[in-house]
Amino acid sequence: MSGNDYDAIIIGAGVIGGAVGFELARRGHRTLNIDKGPGAGYGSTSASSAVIRFSYSTETGVAAAWDGMHYWKNWADYLGVDDENGHARLIQCGMALLIPGEEGHHNRVTPIWDRLGVPYEYWDRDTLATRAPGFDLHLYGPPARPTDDAFWDDAHGEMVGALFSPDAGYVDDPQLAAHNLQRAAEASGGDFRFRTEVVGIVREETDAGVRVGGVELADGSIVSAPVVVNVGGPHSSHINRLAGVYDSMNIKTESIRHETYHVPGPPDIDFTADGFAVADDDSGIYFRPQPNNNILVGTTDPACDPKVPVGPDDDLGELTTDGWETNTLRINKRMPSLGVPLPHEKKGVVDRYDKSDDWIPIYDRTDLDGFYVAIGTSGNQFKNAGVAGHMMAELIEAVEAGHDHDADPLHVTARYTGLDLDLGTFRRNRQINTNSSMTVHG
Ligand SMILES: Cc1cc2nc3c(=O)[nH]c(=O)nc-3n(C[C@H](O)[C@H](O)[C@H](O)COP(=O)(O)OP(=O)(O)OC[C@H]3O[C@@H](n4cnc5c(N)ncnc54)[C@H](O)[C@@H]3O)c2cc1C
């Protein structure tokens, strides 16, 4: 469509912004995604580890992640269009959640998996040793840093086993996934504008009170729409301030710096072909296979690691030697045959998480009528892009039709699994969810 009037403007064209645009466009809404980057998925999406797993601490968190996997599994059908660059692919290498002791995250997860029918295998220690040859299954945790004496302490026990999710894995090209969503939205009539910055949110007086009226762009022009969705990733709190809704939200978001690392795989195993993803709370890392027998290592952000707030447009600098050494030493403890990579071999990516107070996203309306948010994705919502798009489209249609989501949180039926998604879980005004693990396994 041309012109400057739309049914909905989506600020951001990352994987979640693209999915919100696609879901609204396929329902017949005239949508515009606006992104200040040069193309789809150039924000934090481009740095994503893109791990697909189901080990969340809330029932809706698990339901969303389990349903989300089905979008990736049926990606070409879901999109319904070709992309000249090809389609992103789901690699289902499986993921093992290591169990360091009888108490732990696995106890929260298994009852939910049982209730929702999420498949998994319980591996006892011997099975884990067989399935993960070359792993040192001793316990060294809780996670520490090599600068702490505790890091060098002798092992104090043995891993109990692992929960293995055979359907888990990763998406091979997260930026391409965002581009795929752009092409799908365009095929349904959606528009995209790149290198275009939103600098203001238009508020309009109506008979029913103040509501959003569109956005102001950096060139001073206005694009009008009765619905605006903030999917600005690490810029989310800045955009909320532009809209005047930041202070009215109980859960806040902030941009924090985050690094992931690429290390050569073990010499004796083809980790790309035969490896699987691992969540290792004992060490404070998660890791997964990458092409050419490489391994991607991310931190679970354990309590001992610094959280580094950084402005959404600040220069991120290079990978730090401290982060590289800490996390390569951590994975080397678990897989001693790796050998400790040398500092000059530093490889990986630096980007930002849009972290919420409890590491759970906010998918919600706001106190400004017509202004919605899909934010606070906290380094763990790539996997849910399709579900997030579906939930936001359902929410926007229901609220615009008069549903009082604040008083009566909307429930949405998941597209592939038919599971119930209680959108109350993602409300802006929830109390901080103390059941959240406050860590990330990708
Ligand atoms: C290092 C790292 C590892 C991760 N690993 C995983 C993982 O393993 N599994 C998982 O599920 N999730 C993971 N995530 C999280 C996941 O990648 C994000 O949740 C997801 O990509 C967020 O997508 P988005 O569309 O919301 O935001 P983004 O991709 O950040 O897109 C936001 C867009 O908004 C645009 N924008 C912002 N402000 C404006 C403005 N004023 N005007 C115009 N445009 C604007 C930006 O240019 C940007 O393109 C990881 C994230 C990071 C950073």
Image (cartoon, grey):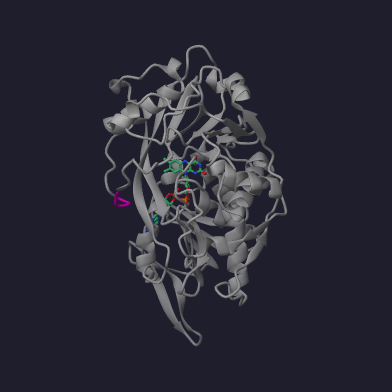
Q: Residue at x 67, y 37 (%)?
A: 120
Residue 42: x, y in percent? 42, 44
Magenta residues (range): 309-313
The residue sitting at the front extreme is 156
Residue 425: x, y in percent? 55, 61
Q: Residue at x 54, y 49 (%)?
A: 182
For this view, does 22 lie left or right of residue 80? Answer: left
Front residue (pair 41, 336): 336
The residue sitting at the bottom extreme is 207
Residue 162: x, y in percent? 58, 32
Task: Using the rendered image of the protein, determine whether residue 20 is visible from the camera's viewpoint.
Answer: yes
Front residue (pair 129, 373): 129
Q: Vertical placement of 3 versus 417: above or below?
A: below
Viewport quadrant of the N terminus: bottom right
For this view, does 36 lie left or right of residue 108? Answer: left
Residue 216: which quarter of the image? bottom left
Residue 389: which quarter of the image? bottom right
Q: Vertical placement of 61 versus 302: above or below?
A: below
The residue sitting at the top extreme is 268
Q: Vertical placement of 231 versus 298: above or below?
A: below
Q: Main secondary structure of the magenta part?
A: loop
Task: Using the rendered image of the protein, determine whether residue 30 is visible from the camera's viewpoint.
Answer: no
